């Protein structure tokens, strides 16, 4: 009996060892240079979304840098939109903090708000039950409400509604774009991007003139002068910049697509786990979680690997990060690429 138990133990150890050893990581063939984080935040990042990050001490970083507001432990930052910071509190109300007066407006909601944006006196919100609502900020009245199919599991990269001239575009939790007329509050279009059952929320939405770009974790769609184009991939993140889309995939690829989603450039970093996309001039920057900053030349798609040094050797980059147009924030540090 003891002998059998010993044999089972050996097999168990071998199983764990083989399982762990089979996992592969990014191993660059060449390290071009080394760096350390020079700039430091007042605390560690505790939560983040597409539009901001909250530090453990309650400070908020938005797309425009560190803000003056501080949140308590029951609040979550949603967006910096128009003249307001949008905060969700205890899943029963949304707080709008006026940037000029610092006064607050409270909008009651039925469940947790996940993303929101503002134009003038209108607040567009996506709730956790996949409801898409428009509120009058002054009267707190619901002007429009439509409940979609509930989503059991969603990707943490949540996009926010976009106000156009007379339309509101909602990126839903079930892979659709719901287009609502802002005057009649009627549904103009219901565009299905993808119909996966899990992790199918719209993770990216961008409008550039008459062109619209949206993505779920599995599919990108562009609408160019009324024509629709699509591109399938296992998407980690995506960014539109200067007429091109830049895509990070789960397989370690960095892909450049034109507006019609035709591949124009592509490079693969085997087994790389890439996070964040910042484009400055002709350089794209992203971080790789085992401890590298990747600098990609978007003209010819050659890249440099920069090893990030910590106190005791290479610094792993596997904690929460956030990025804006010029900076990548990681844990308690950030890199400002405009300084280089």
Image (cartoon, rainbow, N blue to C red):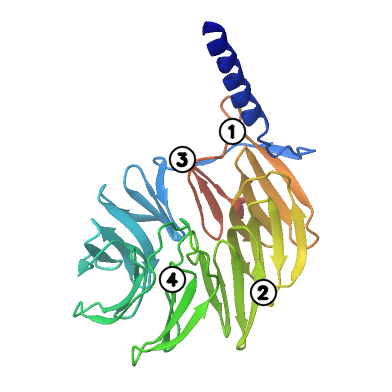
Work out whether mark 1 precedes mark 2 in sequence or the reverse, and give the earlier one: 2
Q: Which mark is residue 332?
A: 3
Q: CA distance from mark 4 to mark 1?
A: 37 Å
Please tell me in which quadrant of the rendered image residue 300 appears: bottom right
Mark 1 neighbour class, 10 Å CA radius: few under 14, some 14 to 19, many 20 or more: some
Decide which of tag 2 and tag 4 comes sooner along the chain.
4
Q: Position of residue 302 (x, y in %)?
A: 79, 53
The label nearer to you, 3 versus 4, is 4
Residue that numbered label 2 is attached to: 243
Other residues around mark 2 within 10 Å, as few (<14) / some (14–19) / many (≥20): few
Whole-angstrom CA distance, mark 1 to mark 2, is 34 Å
Discs 2, 4 touching: Cβ within 8 Å: no
Q: Would you identify the image quadrant in which residue 112 lies?
A: bottom left
* Residue on which the image places disc 1: 315
Write down the residue under mark 4.
Answer: 172
Q: For the residues carrying marks 2 and 4, which lies nearer the camera in this image?
A: 4
Contact flag, marks 3 and 4 (Cβ < 8 Å): no
Residues 97 and 267: in front is 267
Ranked by sequence position, the earlier of labels 3 and 2 is: 2
Q: Earlier in the sequence, mark 1 or mark 3?
A: 1
């Amino acid at each position: 009996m003891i002998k059998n138990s010993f044999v089972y133990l050996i097999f168990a150890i071998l199983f764990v060892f083989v399982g762990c050893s089979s996992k592969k990581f990014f191993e660059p063939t060449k390290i071009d240079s080394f760096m350390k984080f020079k700039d430091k935040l007042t605390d560690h990042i505790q939560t983040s979304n597409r539009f901001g990050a909250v530090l453990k001490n309650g400070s908020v970083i938005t797309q425009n840098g560190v803000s003056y507001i501080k949140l308590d432990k029951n609040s979550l930052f949603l967006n910096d939109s128009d003249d307001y910071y949008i905060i969700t509190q205890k899943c029963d109300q949304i707080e709008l903090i006026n940037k000029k007066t610092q006064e607050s407006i409270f909008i009651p909601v039925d469940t947790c708000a996940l993303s929101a944006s503002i134009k003038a006196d209108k607040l567009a919100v996506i709730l956790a039950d996949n409801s898409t609502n428009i509120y009058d900020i002054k009267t707190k009245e619901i002007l429009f409400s439509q409940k979609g199919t509930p989503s059991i599991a969603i990707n943490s990269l949540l996009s926010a509604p976009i106000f156009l001239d007379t339309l509101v575009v909602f990126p839903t939790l079930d892979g659709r774009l719901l287009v609502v007329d802002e005057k009649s509050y009627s549904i103009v279009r219901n565009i299905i991007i993808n119909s996966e059952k899990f992790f199918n929320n719209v993770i990216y939405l961008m409008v550039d003139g008459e062109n619209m770009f949206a993505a779920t974790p599995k599919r990108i769609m562009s609408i160019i002068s009324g024509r629709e184009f699509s591109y399938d991939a296992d998407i980690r993140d995506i960014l539109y910049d200067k007429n091109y889309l830049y895509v990070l995939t789960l397989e370690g690829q960095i892909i450049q697509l034109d507006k019609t989603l035709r591949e124009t450039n592509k490079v693969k970093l085997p087994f790389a786990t890439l996070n964040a996309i910042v484009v400055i001039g002709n350089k794209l920057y992203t971080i790789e979680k085992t401890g590298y900053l990747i600098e990609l030349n978007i003209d010819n798609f050659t890249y440099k690997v920069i090893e990030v040094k910590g106190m005791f050797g290479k610094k792993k980059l596997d904690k929460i990060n956030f990025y804006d147009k010029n900076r990548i924030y990681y844990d308690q540090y950030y890199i400002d690429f405009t300084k280089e």
